[in-house]
Amino acid sequence: MTTAAVKFAPSILAADFARLGDQVAEAERAGADRIHIDVMDGHFVPNLSMGAVVVESLRRVTRLPMEAHLMIFNPDFFVDEFVQAGTDSFLVHWEGNNDLSRTVQHIKALGKRVGVAINPATPAAVLEDIMPDLDQVLVMTVNPGFGHQHFLHGTLPKIGRAREMIDRIKPGCGLEVDGGIDATTAALAVAAGADVPRNDRIGQDGRQHGAAADQGRTSMRGVRHVAAGGRRFGAREGSCGFLAR
């Protein structure tokens, strides 16, 4: 896989919310491919985070696609609101969804990309029947709800099983990983079959804009290069979604 084939979706969960717009702009200048919005309801996961109003505010400061990761129960109640705010794509969880097919079709009917996320304890096999309808699969490599957790190496075989399923059923569907991603774990995930690491490195050091953008650009290029090397042997080249917390 070439470095250009590895995509990065930094999460705003790690940002300084006092200067969120500036830090999203820094991520864009540093080479991010899209912005990941972690939405939590305090019920599906033991944490509470932002809503559609944050997407609406960020839509004014970035041209990048915005991806809403809905770690919530009953996502259908909120999808329309997020679309109106400017969300470009959605990730909904297999776990805790009353009617996953209905949710996926609802999002597709709104003209948006849709993916399904699975938690570390959920087998990849649950994706087989819904796979033809998906644009993206997200394998959680940490338990959802909190940032800055350690990568769960036991998820690597599942990434490989998800890749095999994508290649067999829906080639071109993206395979994203979320949690504990750095230069080392990104390479492992890409070697297993992923193509998008989710990155939690937006503006953590609070530096001035130019310096932060330069540092972020260097970091993303470095991880992208190492990750691409990880796919040199075996796994099929495809769209990659790395989410790094």
Image: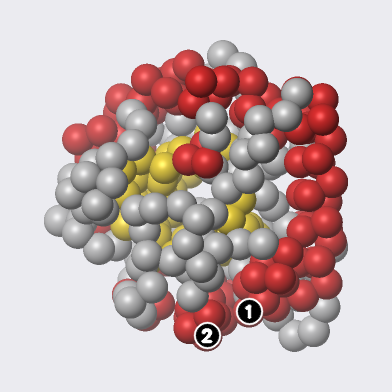
> Which of the image's four quarters has the N terminus?
bottom right
Q: Nearer the viewer, residue 224 or 1?
A: 224
Q: Nearer the viewer, residue 19 or 62?
A: 19
* Mark 2 element type: helix
Which quadrant of the structure image shows residue 95? bottom left
Specify the amino acid type for callout 2: Pro
Q: Residue at x 32, y 75 (%)?
A: 122
Query: What residue would you read off at disc 1?
Result: 192
Task: Tally the marks.
Answer: 2
Q: Earlier in the sequence, mark 2 or mark 1?
A: 2
**121 to 194, vertically: above or below:** below
Label 1: few (<14), some (14–19) or many (≥20) C-alpha neighbours in 10 Å: many
Query: What residue would you read off at disc 2?
Result: 157
**229 to 62, vertically: above or below:** below
Q: Residue at x 53, y 70 (%)?
A: 151
Specify the amino acid type for callout 1: Ala
In this rendering, would 53 be left or right of 74? right
Which quadrant of the structure image shows residue 209? top right
Is residue 61 among the parts visible in the rendering? yes
Q: Position of residue 223 (x, y in %)?
A: 77, 59
